[in-house]
Amino acid sequence: MINSMKCKESADFEIANAFDGIEVVNANYIKQNFSKHVHEGYTIGVIEYGAQRFYRSGASHIAGQSSIILVNADDVHNGESATPNGWGYKAMYPTPEHFAQVSTDLYSGKDLTPYFRSAVIEDRQLAEQLRLIFSQVEINSSQLLMETLIYATLMSLTLRHSSHLSLPKESSGSRDKLLLAKEFLDSYPEEDISLIKLAAIADLSQFHFVRQFKKHFNLAPHSYQIQMRLKKAKALLKQGITLSQVSTMCGFYDQSHFTHHFKKALGTTPSRFQKQARNYNTNL
């Protein structure tokens, strides 16, 4: 069975019948090479065969069979095969809001959203819990069962493998200035803004803006803009808007440009992602 899966690259996205929908993917890759990108949610995945090499938190990591991959929301990361025959994995993408529900229960109402310092963990019990979730997604189990399984898994992850991220305070206030530019890109990703205007928002020279933005957010301003365009595109695709409209509305040069960046970041095409998301909506 594993050999047959290796013959074809694929990424099948589904929306779990839980907590208003959590994205889940079942992927098999050989040559796929993910560009550096971010997700608005966490990535929690299990390697089913082969091994994956990926960058996260300033270092490269390798996850082998049955290892669990952990990527925090907004962590810059990439991915490629660490073996000649590729790798397969299943993953889900809970949002910080999903973890906030868990943390308020665990910490007497305090919203202490978890931060996973380890990019790869070995936890056989949790790996089996995740596999159980993915098997129930495949057969479209009841909402109550799905939410119970996912909630229990997120709680176990939080208790056993998380900490809380403390951001360093900067007396210069440079991060606050950079956040103004970042917030502009978050709100208006489709805008064809110039570097000089974006740097002006942060009240920095163009040279210092590019250097500082990449230092703080691990992506150059243009690369970050692409990620925000893809985030907007995913939301529009789920609404059933045509690919040509989505590419225009999100600021891509054309549909081919849009498809190229989408596949490099998500491992599937926009049309395939939209079809799978539409299947979920029609089943509601």
Image (tube, helix red, strand yellow):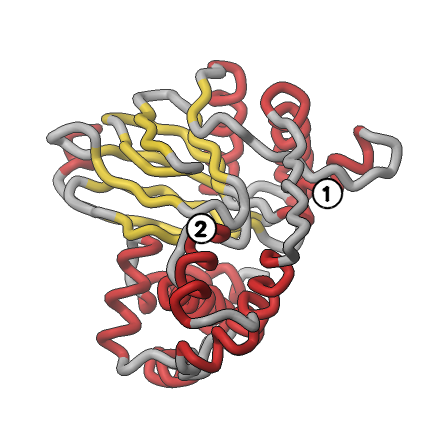
The picture places residue 195, in percent across and down from the top left corner, at: 40, 77
Q: Quadrant of residue 162?
A: top right
Circle 1 sits in a helix, a strand or a loop, which is it? helix
The picture places residue 26, in percent across and down from the top left corner, at: 36, 42
Q: Tell me how far mark 1 sits from mark 2, CA to CA.
A: 28 Å
Residue sitting at 50 percent across and 51 percent down?
A: 216
- Tell which of 51 and 177 is nearer to you: 177
Q: Looking at the image, can residue 20 be seen? A: yes
- Tell which of 260 and 28 is nearer to you: 260
114 relative to 64, above or below: below
Residue sitting at 50 percent across and 29 percent down?
A: 130
Amino acid type of disc 2?
Answer: Lys
What residue did someone put label 1 on? 100
Residue sitting at 47 percent across and 81 percent down?
A: 197
Answer few, some or many: residues within 10 Å of disc 2's Cα (few below 14, many 20 plus, some between 14 and 19): few
What residue did someone put label 2 on? 215
